[in-house]
Amino acid sequence: MCHVSVGHVAREAESQGLSTVTVAVRSFAHVAREMGYPRTVVTRHPMGRPLGPPGDTGAQRRVVHAALSLLESATEGGVIVELEEPYRPPTD
Amino acid sequence: MADDPLESFDDFKNSFAYGTRNDLSFKFLKKLDGDEAAEFLRLVLFEVGELFDGAAPERLIDLVYEWQVRAYQPELDEGRPWTYEDRPFAPLERSLGESTLGLVTSSGHFPSGEDPTPFGVQDMSQVEATSRIDDFLRATPELTVIPRDIPETELRVRHPGYDIRSVVRDPGVALPRTLLVEAERSGLIGRLHDEMFSFVGACAQGRIRREAPGWVERWKAAGIDVLLLVPV
């Protein structure tokens, strides 16, 4: 339900002229498509861990940078970028 | 029921979704039919057996992830009221390096001492929140303000819809404050706004649609140019 709730916020923001980018997990990528999220980065992460494993700053940074990059590069609504990096918790 | 000798397999698999065996990382079992859930559990046990012999744990992680994705895919004929045909889009008004970014997450974070006290309950536990999922889904979402310089020890989180263990271990999993401060210092963004925002995304959909316009007006009035949104 979180992804639907955030979709409503994103749609409202864009309709008021505020640019948005959303990081969604793949389980709910269909919500991003169906709601017409303006800009979406989809991660291959489990639900509840959208930006990456706890303690893995490198993986989280790659997701944040992908989202910021999409903010600048998108030229129309409904753009979805799917990241391929799998979920790999740090082992040490 | 877990102590019912006549418990069916359907009852068993469904008990992981707000039932006697509640586990928010595995509540997706309820979305699988009996045969699918049985196959999932068979594969999990097989991979656990492989772990005994030195298999990489990533195989088990990937297996659970793929089934989670599979479980949440909607049926083709399933009506979904959130489907829209239009694609609202607001182009950036200035470069990202000159923009003030607002961070909004539906993670349920709040500062210590500023508990939103859902339903008037002080210090509601995660367990109680989970047990009241139906109440949350009928409630108006409350926007919580989190100062960007809040010490991590002052952050609290509670949410009835997802397993919060990861964000307790590392708030950056859903609230990437540290990385956005880093992006500010490097010039990638102009500025991270002084206030970050969180709410519980498990809420009444009609009510969040009514709340959202006021939230956006507030963010715009505060000088926010762009939003990073993080649902969980």
Image (cartoon, coloured by chain):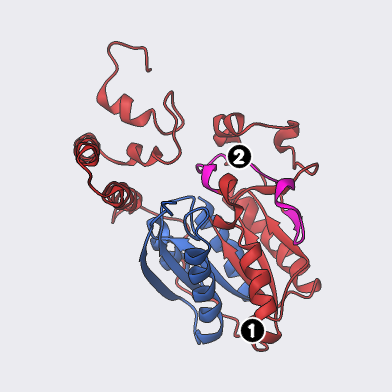
Chain colours: A blue, B red
**Which chain is home to disc 1?**
B
Is B192 placed above or below B111 here? below
Expressed as whole percent of the image width and height from the top left, the position of residue A33 reads 41, 67
> Is residue B87 or residue B180 the one in the foreground?
B180
> Is residue B179 or residue B84 the one in the foreground?
B179
- What kind of element bears circle 1? helix
Tell me the crowding category of disc 1: few under 14, some 14 to 19, or many 20 or more residues within 10 angstroms, Cα based.
many
> Is residue A85 or residue B33 the one in the foreground?
A85
**Magenta stretch bounds:** B144-166
Is A36 placed above or below B200 here? below
- What kind of element bears circle 2? helix
Q: Residue furthest front?
A: A92
Residue plotted at (68% across, 32% down)? B124
Circle 2 sits on which residue?
B136
| Amino acid type of the residue tagged 1 in the rendering | Leu
Circle 1 sits on which residue?
B96
Expressed as whole percent of the image width and height from the top left, the position of residue B198 reads 67, 54
Expressed as whole percent of the image width and height from the top left, the position of residue B192 reads 71, 72
| Amino acid type of the residue tagged 2 in the rendering | Phe
